[in-house]
Structures are given as C-alpha cells and as structure tokens.
Image (spheres, rainbow, N blue to C red):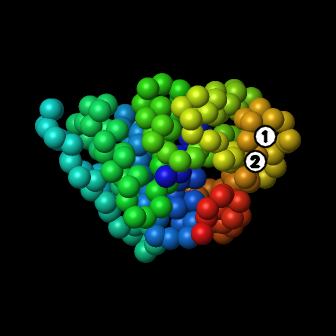
C-alpha cells in the first residue's frame, strides 16, 4: 500500500492518487482515506456509499469501477465509522490483491496518521511554496516516526523542483506535475508526468 500524503489541503494529493493509479502497472485500487473531506470518488466520477448508522459494524469495502480506466478500481471513504473500525477497514483494503494507492487526509493529526501507519511507503505531495513544503516535511517526519519509509516527493503545479526540496523533505523528488486546466488528469502533459513518476517508484512492476 502506497500512501499519498501532504501537509495541506489542495496540495494535489487526490490528483496524484488517481494519476499514479492509472500510471502504475495494474490492477490498482485507489483508496480515499479522508473521512472528513472525501473527494477521491468525485474526481474519479463514482458514487460514495450512503452513511452507515452510528455504531453499526464496519462494512466491507465498497469498491467501484473507474469509469474510464479498466485497470483502476476506486474505494470511496467509509461513512459512519469510528477510528478503530476505520483502521480495520483500511487494513482490509491493504490486504486486497490489487496494489493500493491511498489518498490521505492533510496535516499531521490522528486521522492522517492511520493510513501512514498502515502503508508500506509514502509519497509526499506539495506545491512549490515554502509553507506547503514545510508542512510536507512535517508529514514526512511523521511517517518516519510511525516506521513507514518516505519513497519520494512529488512537486505539484510546477515544471521544476530545486534541490532544496529533496533536502527539506528528506527524500528524492520523483518528479513534477505541471499546472493545467481542469480536468487535469485528461491533459497529456499531466499523464506523461505521472507516468515518469510511476517509473521511479520502487516496486512499480
């Protein structure tokens, strides 16, 4: 399981999750681990399950087929689950036979820690601005504190990445993703960028 994390909302985590899901050798399961602000399902064009009753047992993951990419399945964020049930849900997704790429909550709080703890590796995403990069470095440090290696950093909405980015995050820059108009993931330059990034992720095959 590969966690896609970042220090701030709007850094490009969701776009990177779906971009890498399509670029990695399939089949791939794209997972939304952001219970408070889920949007992976909306960007992918699939429905999210209805809310569960409070205290109800955690449901089996409700996987949806990606509408345009047959190699990608989408697992929307669960609803009505407490923290323990959420971690069990996420571990069930991690045990799936498909490779899982997880869209994590922003920040360094308890909700963000759960997918980082469950994942085998972390990719940190940040735009090229100092506050976001500092927060991304904090996220990377939290992942390491939880025992999960940071395999690299993706710089979003940029065509270049200074060497200082790698030094700050403590991991190699896997690549940059240029800023494009919406829908971003249909743009050839963006798809090519994620393909190059995927080639640099250990265990792509």
Quarter of the image for the C terminus: give it: bottom right
Other residues around mark 1 within 10 Å, as few (<14) / some (14–19) / many (≥20): some
Q: Secondary structure at mark 2?
A: strand
Q: Is residue 68 left or right of residue 160?
A: left
Q: Residue placed at 70% from the left, 27% from the top?
A: 134
Q: Compared to 128, does 49 lie above or below?
A: below
Residue 85 position within the rendered picture, expressed as x and y whole percent measured from the top left: 27, 37
Q: Residue placed at 21% from the left, 48% from the top?
A: 59
Residue that label 2 marks:
173
Residue 23 in view here: no
Other residues around mark 2 within 10 Å, as few (<14) / some (14–19) / many (≥20): many
Callout 1–callout 2 Cβ contact below 8 Å: yes
The one nearer the camera, 65 or 186, is 65
Residue 57 position within the rendered picture, expressed as x and y whole percent measured from the top left: 16, 40
Residue 138 position within the rendered picture, expressed as x and y whole percent measured from the top left: 64, 27
The one nearer the camera, 114 or 52, is 114
Residue that label 1 marks:
166
Q: Is residue 167 left or right of residue 47?
A: right
Q: Compared to 203, does 147 lie above or below?
A: above
Residue 6 position within the rendered picture, expressed as x and y whole percent measured from the top left: 59, 37
> In which quadrant of the rendered view does residue 78 lie?
top left
State how far apart marks 1 and 2 are (Cα). Answer: 6 Å
* First in sequence: mark 1 vs mark 2: 1
The one nearer the camera, 15 or 85, is 85
Instruction: Report the residue that reaches farthest toward the right.
Output: 163
Residue 97 in view here: yes
Q: Secondary structure at mark 1?
A: helix
Q: Is residue 95 left or right of residue 61?
A: right
Q: Compared to 62, does 128 lie above or below?
A: above
Instruction: Report the residue that reaches farthest toward the front.
Output: 147
């Amino acid at each position: 399981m590969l966690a896609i994390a970042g220090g701030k909302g709007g850094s490009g985590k969701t776009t990177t999750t779906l971009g890498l899901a399509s670029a990695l050798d399939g089949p791939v399961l794209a997972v939304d681990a952001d219970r408070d602000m889920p949007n992976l399902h909306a960007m992918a064009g699939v429905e999210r399950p209805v809310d569960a009753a409070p205290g109800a047992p955690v449901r089996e993951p409700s996987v949806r087929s990606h509408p345009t990419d047959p190699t990608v399945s989408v697992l929307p964020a669960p609803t009505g689950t407490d923290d323990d049930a959420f971690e069990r849900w996420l571990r069930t997704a991690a045990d799936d036979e498909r490779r899982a790429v997880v869209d994590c909550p922003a920040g360094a709080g308890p909700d963000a820690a759960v997918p980082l703890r469950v994942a085998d590796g972390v990719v940190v995403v940040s735009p090229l601005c100092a506050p976001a990069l500092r927060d991304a470095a904090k996220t990377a440090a939290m992942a390491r504190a939880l025992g999960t290696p940071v395999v690299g950093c993706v710089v979003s909405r940029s065509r270049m990445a200074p060497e200082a980015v790698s030094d700050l995050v403590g991991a190699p820059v896997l690549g940059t993703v240029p800023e494009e108009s919406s829908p971003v993931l249909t743009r050839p330059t963006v798809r090519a960028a994620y393909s190059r990034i995927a080639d640099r992720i250990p265990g792509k095959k």
